[in-house]
Amino acid sequence: MATYKGIQGYTVQALSADPVPLIGGQLWYRTDAGKFKLGVIGAEAWASAPSTPTALMNGGCAGTATAALTFGGRDPSPVAVTFEFDGSAWTSGGAYPLSLNRPGGWGTQTAALGAGGSPPYTDTSNTYNGSSWTAGPTINAARSAFQSFGTQTAAVMAGGTTGTRVSTVEEFNGTSWTTGTSMPAVKADGGGGGSSTAGLSFLGTIAPGAGGRTTASYAYNGSSWTATNSCNTARSGCGGGGTAPTTTMTYGGEPPGYFAGTEQFNGTSWTEVADLATGRQGVFVPLSQATQEAQLCIMGDTGTALTTVEEWSGSPVTAKNVTVS
């Protein structure tokens, strides 16, 4: 006979109060009320947002859905442009020091960190103060297309490629880059979300070609990696981000075709939710401080680079009584 733990991978907790934070899809038993309760995500959808001034793919991001920063990218050659979004319009910011494809981004619109990228593979990092970029310390191994999560002063870059896919990890403490614990497998072109002590690396490629794309998702606690339940559809070139595992989501990528699907993580498993209006890969990543209630899918490509931006909005998770029989 199937059990809830066998299906979901965890047992139902008995609690005297609703958990904090509420997580969509989480089931618990309220001992004081004698009722099962479920975290229910409100209405969610992607909608059209203001387009960027230039069509690009494969750039870096930082910030939130209403205070976003993008830098680098290509169409078809790498560029050094920076764009800022205030929730209603995009404007040009201070140019990035290098023309880059597939850098990583962390932090906010006025306190951002960018690092790595190609071609050629670079070991540079730079910080942004809301108007200009300043050179920072170099990373230990030049790379691009890695998974990134964390903040400007507590950043993690995981895996990526140096010409060959790697599993190595580097961490930034605001002053210097140091070697962290390697991921369980080599992986590039995936997504990341969360913090330096509670992070996620998901999707991407473990080998060349469509057959090398993976559904794998790994959680990082600052010292070790643990496999979580996998994403539903293997893909690379996806967007994604979040301030914690329970606020992380991913969208877009390829294959199949130019993917429009969106998935959210609740701390245990990935759930498919509403699709993008325009499937795409090469999405700018990660929008590290955005959440499952407010996210942007920025540019990317469908064979040609896009200016198209879509905005995700979702209602907060609420606790609902569940009737069981």
Image (cartoon, helix red, strand yellow):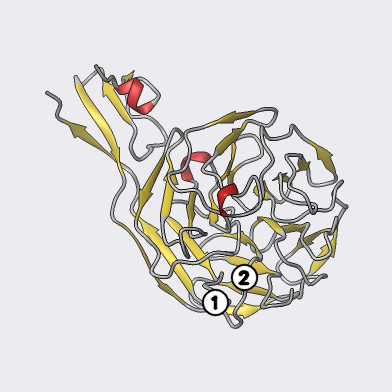
Left or right side of 316 for 85: right
Q: Mark 1 or 2 closer to N-term?
A: 2
Q: Quadrant of residue 28?
A: top left
279 above or below 234?
Answer: below
Left or right side of 316 for 72: right
180 above or below 214?
Answer: above
Give the x, y percent position of residue 50: 48, 78
Q: Residues within 10 Å of mark 1 (few under 14, many from 20)?
A: many
282 above or below 230?
Answer: below
The quadrant in which the N terminus is found is top left
Residue drawn at (73%, 34%) of the image: 182
Give the x, y percent position of residue 41: 31, 46
Which is nearer the eye, 89 or 184?
184
> Which residue in the protein does label 1 denote?
306
Determine contact: label 1, label 2, CB under 8 Å.
Answer: yes
Amino acid type shown at disc 1? Leu
Res. 308 visible in picture: yes
Looking at the rendered structure, the secondary structure element under dot 2 is loop
Which is nearer the eye, 228 or 11?
228
Residue drawn at (42%, 70%) of the image: 278
Q: Residue most toward the bottom? A: 53
Res. 191 visible in picture: no
Res. 57 mark: 2
Q: Residues within 10 Å of mark 2 (few under 14, many from 20)?
A: many
Give the x, y percent position of residue 4: 30, 23
Give the x, y percent position of residue 238: 54, 57
Residue drawn at (77%, 49%) of the image: 164
